[in-house]
Amino acid sequence: MSTFPVSWTAEPGTALRGTLAVPGDKSVSHRAIMLASLADGVSRIDGFLEGEDARATEALFRAMGVRIETPAHGVRIVHGVGLDGLRAPVAALDCGNAGTAMRLLAGLLAGQAFHTTLVGDASLSKRPMLRVTTPLARMGARIDTGPGGLPPLHVRGGTPLAGVEHRAEVASAQVKSALLLAGLYARGTTRVLEPQPTRDYTERMLAAFGWPVDFAPGHATLTGGHRLRAIDVHVPADFSSAAFFLVAATVVPGSELRLARVGMNPRRTGLLHVLRLMGANIAVEPAGEQGGEPVADLVVRHAPLRGIEVPVAHVADMIDEFPALFVAAACAHGVTTVRGAAELRVKESDRIATVGTGLRAMGIRVDEAPDGAAIHGGRLQGGRIDSHGDHRVAMAFAVAAQCARGAVTIDDVANVATSFPGFVELARTAGFGLA
Ligand SMILES: O=C(O)C1=C[C@@H](OP(=O)(O)O)[C@@H](O)[C@H](O)C1
Ligand SMILES: C=C(OP(=O)(O)O)C(=O)O
């Protein structure tokens, strides 16, 4: 159960100051539980995201017989059961709000000897699953979806899988990862080619667990028949959580904020490049590596922004940052145009519509397109925002409120706990007006 209130009241606070450490990366936390569970031996995970999405994945592996200890906040000790050691769960597996859990597990569970059912909350139950089930079927997987290709997924294990080459139509790390995880159980070679490179955590982590993977931006290949060996995983701080503070400190006058040791995987940092193109002042101070990922301190100072055409080449590398970018664009001088981002329509909410509607309620002109929007920078007014249960939309409007003329009420914010537990407290520490 979430401890978050249903609504927030947000209003301009003070200039944002100090040093913040945001929680661990959600994508890495999901994968760490999955691979550690399938490994031979005991793995330790440090920096694990104590958010509802990552904890949902953890609970699912517990339900399949994996012993996972929590010796401290953000730490997990996973007693791996080996590639074929999972046990049939007694009930349906509830992925909650986590698309990553459901899509990756569709691939992983297709390779098991038993049947499973994957269900999700109201938002996840509206998200498209054929993008994973169709290519998995080509590998021999038997997965039934609900009507219209939506959850629940009924995964009928016990069928032999064979590797395929899949040319993905959408740039999606979840699709790529689902196929690679099925590929662990497949005869022969599984190869995924992407229209644009996406985050490569599955590939990197499989390699770290000792499974040979050939990968480079835009493709990944592996062959069945190896084993995973337990390792220690150090989860870096989540760039997507840092993103809200990058925008907030940029738009609130007088701000100077340091975000400590943020994960800087190049497939995640598109927002940094785009904010800089808009005029942001963000210094990157490299701070070595954490769990095989580059990390850096990000020092962000207030700077005036100007509208730009967001280069389509950056879209996949900032796919979760558009709610925050739309807010930056609303505070910029001139028009910011986003195209090539139709994927935003099938996230936890239709993010083009939910953010567009919210910004219009605050007095900003937003012209929507099927695959993006034109945001006309202006003066934000107070108002009432429905975040539609979308964590990133709720946090983006908490940022927008910091430079609005009146108070902003943001409804349906409980799901912020899926990706960013402690957001309210941390934001207040930095200077946000948020209650
Ligand atoms: O693989 C992952 O961990 C994720 C991939 C992205 O989804 P898509 O694969 O649908 O682009 C992203 O939006 C999501 O938050 C996490
Ligand atoms: C899209 C997101 O996550 P998921 O697909 O795992 O629900 C997100 O966190 O913005």
Image: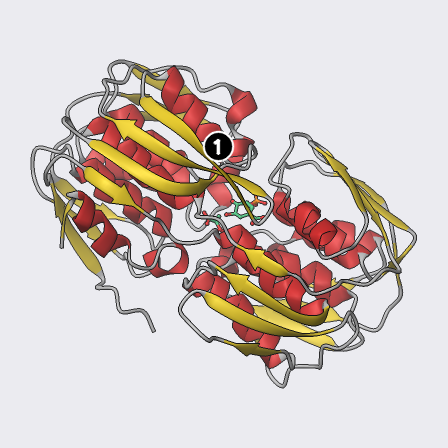
Q: Quadrant of the N terminus?
A: bottom left
At numbered mark 1, what does the secondary structure look like: helix, strand or loop? loop
111, above or below 270, in the image:
below
Q: Hey, which quadrant is residue 406 in on the image?
A: top left
Tell me if residue 16 can be seen: yes
Badge 1 local density, few (<14 within 10 Å), some, or many (20+)? many
Task: Pick the residue in front: 419 or 405.
Answer: 419
Q: Quadrant of the C terminus?
A: bottom left
- Tell me where residue 33 appears, x and y as whole percent: 59, 65
Q: Which residue is mark 1?
A: 269
The structure residue drawn at horizontal position 58% and vertical position 58%, both measured from the top left corner, is 233
Residue situated furthest bottom in the rendering: 90
- Tell me where residue 78 appears, x and y as whole percent: 60, 72
Q: Please tell me how many numbered marks the rendered image carries.
A: 1
- Tell me where residue 114 appears, x and y as whole percent: 76, 78
- For badge 1, the amino acid type reads Thr
Q: Is 308 left, or right, of 11 in this rendering?
A: right
Residue situated furthest right in the rendering: 188
- Tell me where residue 287 appears, x and y as whole percent: 46, 37
Task: Pick the residue in front: 26 or 231.
Answer: 231
Q: Hey, which quadrant is residue 247 in on the image?
A: top left
Mark 1 sits near ligand 1, with its Cβ under 8 Å away: no
390, above or below 171, in the image:
below
The structure residue drawn at horizontal position 47% and vertical position 40%, both measured from the top left corner, is 345
